[in-house]
């Protein structure tokens, strides 16, 4: 079946059937969350956020839609967090605001990162630390945790064994065969699970369109070393603040070339502190310095390791490019974007690159040198995976429609029957009974917007309003009328913003509005305020379209005095 | 010198010195326009538009800033148009609105395209058709036109010979050695001009960051044929409406596989009509059909050649993806994006791709198959160019800062002395005297926004307003006061849009506003309206920030009754 087909509500859940409902991450890259239900109990895998796009202006974050479970939070036996990236853990604080004692299950690093985040929200969670090889019984769900390799250490896949069948969920993963920490994706465990029978395989689709194999992270090390070897001034490296192994390689290269390293940016400082304390990041003795010490060091002994690799305007790198950061860049400094370029961020990233180059800095990004590799399995790796696990059914997860479909095709090419490849979307309901998985319905599953202090109060209609306001501005027309005398006491006053015309342009239409309004008041004393406002709206709307060729938001206000 | 350094106004122009001022295209990809001045006369090369980015909401187009020349339009001897792309000809109608009889000089196809555009603006231009090898004396400028190969036929470079020296301007170009029309970039002419001495070489920087050589357009033909050979239903191809050679290859592949072709989209129909009439597009007998005929044809005999390759929401392809186009796509249809993916458009393009795939269509884009090649010279070609021309000075044009710097480095690697590589930006003033070119100053050169019927009325402050409105919405607070009685006659009435809260949330602050306003009116009868409005702004602004964590635009209105 194709995603996007509209289905009705699912049937009542039968005892012994395991129901799987993705509440986010299928149709978008982000806000990953999957619900598993069995015999009245609920297990959640991941609870992440999605970052807004340009057609969602002013939105801070987008959450999975909790409404499917929010009346049943007492039945939730736990939230398994596969790894510590925002798109997998970022919505946990919002879920725990609804019920603070839902247990969180994850690896040491994953739990340390979410605990730091929850501290900012003043929540102390219940946690259960697990490691690869562990099995935990969470209500009716027997969960076995399997090591997977990703762009953050300590990531886990989870096998969920139930009376209805066995589900294997990869989380985000790739299969670097020479990872920095030697912790490879455990294909022996995948093989064993496969031999026992994986009835439903949920697999990461992010790179399902990418041919071949993802390059090993290790190759970046020598590139970074080469760049530092020839750098004669300061070196500035930007990457995600959670990419421990990337940052490890920056530390190692810096160490080799006698440079000190300064972490710049709040999340970089915080995450690397956690990673170092827990032993995931090996910090060479005496290499770290703070911003004050940087000023004292010769330029060729400095590496600044900072945030802002996606062009985020408030992050360290953007501010350096604009010249409004404490660190002032000079001609000859070398900036390395050791990071991906997330689609949609190109304009912002290249604005930063141009800004840095105008200051005379040299900028190296993945378009010109091997300074980044992806954290996700490419087509070649997915083929290995399907052939080792040999699942009965496949449900591609984590991706836009195009990624899910591409992943389904890879599964099909390894022999999974087409009818057993479940192409689903957020809110799809998949029922697993006696090892057979089928889509049985669809539940409501919208975008939940966080904006300022509000959660879920912004509707798509509000965003539509914002889009009109942002593209066309608004015109507010205020008139005070006296119904008794049939006259206009004050106004019409016109206030326009973003319409970009001199206010005097409206003089011509004021008279028309006044005339129409007086006529309306005099002709019928029973006109409601709304009707009078509609009279104003019609007159100015027509005039603005014809005269200015614009369609701003029109806000007519009629008051009575 | 680095671009971005601030220079003062240039010295008065001396007789015999040729002054070169780029009014657009240096610092952005688009709105290309360069002014040449000598002995009181002005020659313009290109006059294009720039398409707005997301931080310029609601803007239709961005023009070069004409203010440097607009008082001297009588001195303009002509506008040389190097080729027919929008970023080189799109602003001509706006220039000719200021003075309709400025002569336009260009090749047959270029002039036909601009004339069709000017007809929509009801302007009949003065034109001078030139072809490669021609020399024309335009005032003190002797212009020789040289064939160049690009992603539109009939493109020209121009050598401008003056008493101050010779300037060679490539326009947009690449060096496909096997172009479809056999019309290669004329390196013999470049060599001859170089031997005579090119004092200043203006070169296309668009692909200066891309290693190697741009693949020949011809390779796409066999890929298209392969795709059509295996397609069992309709084939939909999207590309730029000006890419005559790409569309030629679609026609040829369709012809070979017994398919009819329907042009879809206004600009596609118009441009291909012009190209066919002038002989640039060779249309196989009887291959073209219109939309009505498409309905009668079996699916495997149809190719739809349409616009919308950049995800433009109103173009044919987006509307097909949304299901609101006359052509309804079915599962199994094949969509080919035979086009570039312009940075910044990724989100829109992939939204369309996901929409098409949800309908069950297969989508092939340049990420998976060789269905697009660039129209610009890569590093390898630029090296050939510099080595053949051996210019004294180089001024990279057409690109963002990063492209211009990359191009300068390529020139330097071929032996052009660093001090002779002029890294400039819009408004830079370059003076060429006795074969020596130097940057001598900077003139004002802003963005000129077209929005609806207005040109240049939108300021950056208006765009800032729109951004605030688009991200945060607005709150308008209207109160009618009576100064004599010191009371509020009506209000405060609060109207909010895009703020996304139930209006009842404001009840709490209305009282605070009323109290503050009454106090202000009673305490001092001399308060101006503006001062009273500021009182309102302060009260609600503080409240909104603290209570809602937002910063909407606040529009306080105080009327008197």
Image (cartoon, coloured by chain):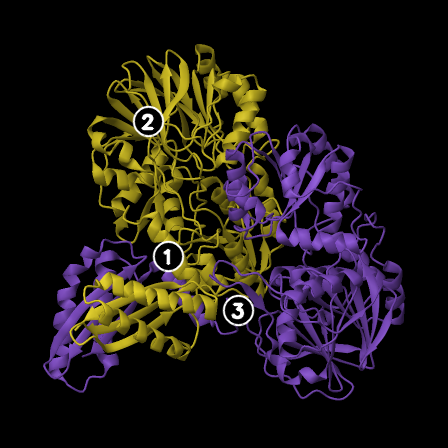
Chain colours: A purple, B yellow
Residue A553 picture location, percent across and down: 32, 65
- Quarter the C terminus of chain A occupies: bottom left
Q: Earlier in the sequence, mark 1 or mark 2?
A: 2
Residue B303 picture location, percent across and down: 50, 54
Q: Which residue is mark 1?
A: B466
Q: Residues within 10 Å of mark 1 (few under 14, many from 20)?
A: many
Element class at badge 2: loop
Element class at badge 3: strand
Q: Nearer the viewer, mark 3 or mark 2?
A: 2
Residue in front for this viewpoint, B224 or B43: B43
Q: Which residue is mark 3?
A: A449
Query: Gap in Å between the C-alphas at discs 3 and 2?
Result: 50 Å
Q: Label 3 marks which chain's residue? A: A
Residue in front for this viewpoint, A112 or B369: A112
Residue B549 picture location, percent across and down: 48, 66
Q: Which residue is mark 2?
A: B9
- Asked whether the beta carbons under mark 3 and mark 2 sit within 8 Å of each other, the answer is no
């Amino acid at each position: 079946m194709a995603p996007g087909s509209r289905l009705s509500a699912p049937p009542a859940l039968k005892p012994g059937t395991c129901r799987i409902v993705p509440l986010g991450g299928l149709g978008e890259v982000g806000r990953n969350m999957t619900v598993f239900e069995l015999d009245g109990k609920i297990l959640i895998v991941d609870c992440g956020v999605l970052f807004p796009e340009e057609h969602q202006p002013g939105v801070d974050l987008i959450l999975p839609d909790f409404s499917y479970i929010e009346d049943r939070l007492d039945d939730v036996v736990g939230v398994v967090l596969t790894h510590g990236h925002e798109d997998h853990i970022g919505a946990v604080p919002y879920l725990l605001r609804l019920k603070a004692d839902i247990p969180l299950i994850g690896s040491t690093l994953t739990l340390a990162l979410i605990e730091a985040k929850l501290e900012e929200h003043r929540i102390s969670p219940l946690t259960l630390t697990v490691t690869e090889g562990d099995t935990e019984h969470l209500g009716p769900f027997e969960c076995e945790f399997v090591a997977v390799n990703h762009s953050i250490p300590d990531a886990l896949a989870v096998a969920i064994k139930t009376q209805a069948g066995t589900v294997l969920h990869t989380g985000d993963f790739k299969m670097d065969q020479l990872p920095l920490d030697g912790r490879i994706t455990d294909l022996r465990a995948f093989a064993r699970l496969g031999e026992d029978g994986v009835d439903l395989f949920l697999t990461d689709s992010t790179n399902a369109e990418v041919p071949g194999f993802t390059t090993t992270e290790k190759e970046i090390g020598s590139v970074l070393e080469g760049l530092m070897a020839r750098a004669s001034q300061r070196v500035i490296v930007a990457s995600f603040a959670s990419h421990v192994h990337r940052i490890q390689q920056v530390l190692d290269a810096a160490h080799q070339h006698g440079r000190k390293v300064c972490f710049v940016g709040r999340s970089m400082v915080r995450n690397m502190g956690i990673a170092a304390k827990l032993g995931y990041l090996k910090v060479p003795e005496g290499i770290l310095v703070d911003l004050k010490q940087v000023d004292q060091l010769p330029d060729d002994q400095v590496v600044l390791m900072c945030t802002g690799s996606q062009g985020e305007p408030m992050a360290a790198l953007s501010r350096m490019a604009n010249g409004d950061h404490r660190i002032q860049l000079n001609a000859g400094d070398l900036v390395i974007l050791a990071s991906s370029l997330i689609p949609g961020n190109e304009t912002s990233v290249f604005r930063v690159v141009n800004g840095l180059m105008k200051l005379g800095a040299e900028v190296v990004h993945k378009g010109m040198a091997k300074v980044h590799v992806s954290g996700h399995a490419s087509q070649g790796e997915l083929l290995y995976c399907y052939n080792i696990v040999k699942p009965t059914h496949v449900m591609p997860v984590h991706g836009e429609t195009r990624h899910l479909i591409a992943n389904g095709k890879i599964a099909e090419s390894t022999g999974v029957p087409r009818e057993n490849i479940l192409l689903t979307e957020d809110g799809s309901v998949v029922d697993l009974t006696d090892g057979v998985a089928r889509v049985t319905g669809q539940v409501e599953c919208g975008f939940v917007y966080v904006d300022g202090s509000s959660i879920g109060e912004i509707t798509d209609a509000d965003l539509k309003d914002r889009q009109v306001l942002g593209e066309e501005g608004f015109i507010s027309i205020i008139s005070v009328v006296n119904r008794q005398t049939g006259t206009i006491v004050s106004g019409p006053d016109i206030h326009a913003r973003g319409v970009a015309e001199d206010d005097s342009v409206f003089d011509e239409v004021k008279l028309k509005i006044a005339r129409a309004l007086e006529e309306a008041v005099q002709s019928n004393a029973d006109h409601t305020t709304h009707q009078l406002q509609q009279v104003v709206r019609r007159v100015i709307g027509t005039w603005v379209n014809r005269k200015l060729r614009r369609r701003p938001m029109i806000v007519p206000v009629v008051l009575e005095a």
